[in-house]
Every structure is written in structure tokens, then in C-alpha cells.
Amino acid sequence: MKKVCVITGGGSGMGLAVAKILGKDNYIIIVGRTVKKLENALKELEAEGIEAEAFACDISDRTSVDKLAAHAKEVGIISSVIHAAGMSPHMGEAKTIMEANALGTINMNEAFYEVMEEGACIIDVSSMSAYLTPKFIMPMKGYKYSRIDKELFMKKMMARVNLFPKKQRSGVAYSISKNFVIWYAKTDAAKFGQKGVRVLSITPGSFKTPMAELEKDDTDGFIEHCAIKRYGDVEEIANLLAFCASDKASYLTGTDILCDGGCVASGVNPLKMK
Ligand SMILES: NC(=O)c1ccc[n+]([C@@H]2O[C@H](COP(=O)([O-])OP(=O)(O)OC[C@H]3O[C@@H](n4cnc5c(N)ncnc54)[C@H](OP(=O)(O)O)[C@@H]3O)[C@@H](O)[C@H]2O)c1
């Protein structure tokens, strides 16, 4: 049977970069909503001799994610899932961002829990805004509802977002959703551990991708606070993702790895930035 790696957000940025590494010894399924983007990515992968296919799927839609998981299981043995799909503040309304990032992560972890086997690994991608945004903004007490009642969970998340002025809501939704991703991956580890599957999150700082280009006006200011005063190259995060997904990281689970060029370590407060 084929060793399969499923990569959400595999049509661009970090997802595509990690596909080029993991594609050396895995059959790759790249996932996203935009078929044209996936087709272009497939051409890039094929040019590198990588065996891959595209699967159109909206991660915020559970039925769509269940179909993806069932398909991946049909194709072979799932060795890893890199869940890199996400929406940044300039990509949509607050609710859509929350649905893609928070609900999307719940959908991915829940659906793939059913089909992953011993030795596999799932990595959820967060964002350094999860660390930089002051803790009092995060509705952490509501996170537990993600496992009890998803509708109530979404209501609680959006109630917090809606306390903010309209123009700040998509940014707040992004930070809360990414803070939730870290919590969710961490608290999923014991459950996945019973199956011998690892789950963790990776938190990128500022990396050169289409998303970062879109958010440039807001993120450029963080670079001067980093210990390494530049944007990260996409290969620098892709290598970390690939290592964590590999058997070399077989004792790594239930944790978050921050890869941000030392930005969070600087103690920068985004509320005090211009
Ligand atoms: N670049 C950075 O500086 C940075 C910093 C912190 C965190 N991150 C995180 O890193 C991850 C990768 O982002 P990137 O920088 O590589 O940006 P990117 O190139 O824009 O990749 C994001 C991908 O997610 C897919 N996507 C978005 N919503 C989706 C949905 N509902 N269902 C399925 N796919 C969806 C997009 O494809 P479609 O639009 O075709 O669906 C796109 O290919 C994201 O989770 C992002 O939040 C990035």
C-alpha cells in the first residue's frame, strides 16, 4: 500500500513547500478550495517527479472533510496529515475566518482520527498571533465546547469577537482561532496517543507566502522585533513541518513548536505598535 500524506493548503505557500519535501517518500494529496490553484501546484510537483493528486475540499465543511478522509484511506496508509490551510484577516469576514481556522481544525482532527493508524502524525498549523495577542482576549473557557457542542462553541467564539469594533473583528477572529488551534492539538494528544498517533501544532511567525504578502502592511512591523531580522523563507518552515511529521520525531506529541525568528521572545506588544 502507498504511504499517503495529506496536505491541506497544499496549493500554495507552506503547504506546497512541504509537499515538495514529503513527496520524496510519500504519495501526496493536496487539498484546498480553488481547483485552478491545486492544478498549478500539481504541475510543480509533477515537474519534481512527485506522485500527487488534488482533492477539492472546504475544511470548514464537515461533510467535505469526511469525504477527504475516506478518500485518503482508500488511496493507502496515511502516514501524515499537514493541516496548513487557513484564512488570514484580509481573506474574509470574522465568522468565515473562525469557521476555516477553528472549525476546520476540529473537522480535520476528528475526521482523520477515524482513519489514521499507529505511527502516523497530524500537524495543525497555528500563528504567532496566538502568542502575541493578549491572553485576556482569548475566550479559553469556551474552548472545551469544541468537543461537546460545536454550535455553542462557535457562538462563544463569535460572542467574544463581536465585542470588538467591526474593523478589528477579522484580526481578533484570526488570533482567537489560532490560539484555539494550539489548545486543541495539545488537548487531543492523549486521545490520539491511544491509537499510537501523534498530534501537535506548529506556530509560524512571518514567512514569505501569498498570505504574508496580503498581510504585509500589518506584519512588516514585527520584523524589526525579531532576533533574525527578516521574513522566514517558506523552506525553513517546510523543513520543520517535514521533520516533525517524520519518524525521527516519534516522541513528539501534545506540544506546540514556535518558529518565528525570535519575534515572540522579544516581548513585543502588538497593541503598542503603530
Ligand atoms: N505566511 C505567514 O507568515 C504565516 C504566519 C502565521 C501563520 N500562518 C499560517 O500558515 C498556514 C499556511 O499559510 P500560508 O502562509 O502558506 O498561506 P497561503 O499560501 O495563503 O495558504 C493557505 C492555503 O489555505 C487554503 N485554504 C484557506 N481556506 C481554506 C478552506 N476553508 N478549505 C480548504 N483550504 C483552505 C488556501 O487555498 P484556497 O483558497 O484555494 O482554499 C491556501 O492554499 C495558514 O494556516 C496560516 O494561517 C502563516
Image (cartoon, rainbow, N blue to C red):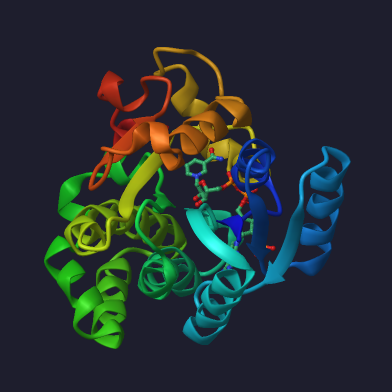
Could you say which is closer to the camera, residue 150 or residue 161? 150
Could you say which is closer to the camera, residue 9 or residue 141? 9
- The residue drawn where x is 22% and y is 44% is 134
Residue 88: x and y, percent? Answer: 53, 54
- The residue drawn where x is 45% and y is 27% is 222
Query: How many numbered marks does the figure carry?
Result: 0
- Vertical placement of residue 244 versus 31, above or below: above
Q: Is residue 42 visible?
A: yes
Indicate left or right for 180 with 69 as reference: left
The quarter holding residue 143 reads: bottom left
Residue 162: x and y, percent? Answer: 32, 72
Residue 54: x and y, percent? Answer: 74, 64
Give the quadrant of the N terminus: bottom right
Residue found at the very far front of the displayed protein: 1
Give the quadrant of the C terminus: top left
Indicate left or right for 97 with 231 as reference: left
- Vertical placement of residue 235 versus 103, above or below: above
The quarter holding residue 194 reads: bottom left
Indicate left or right for 163 with 226 as reference: left
Residue found at the very far left of the displayed protein: 141
Residue 140: x and y, percent? Answer: 16, 61
- The residue drawn where x is 29% and y is 52% is 179
Q: Is residue 8 visible?
A: no
Indicate left or right for 253 with 247 as reference: left
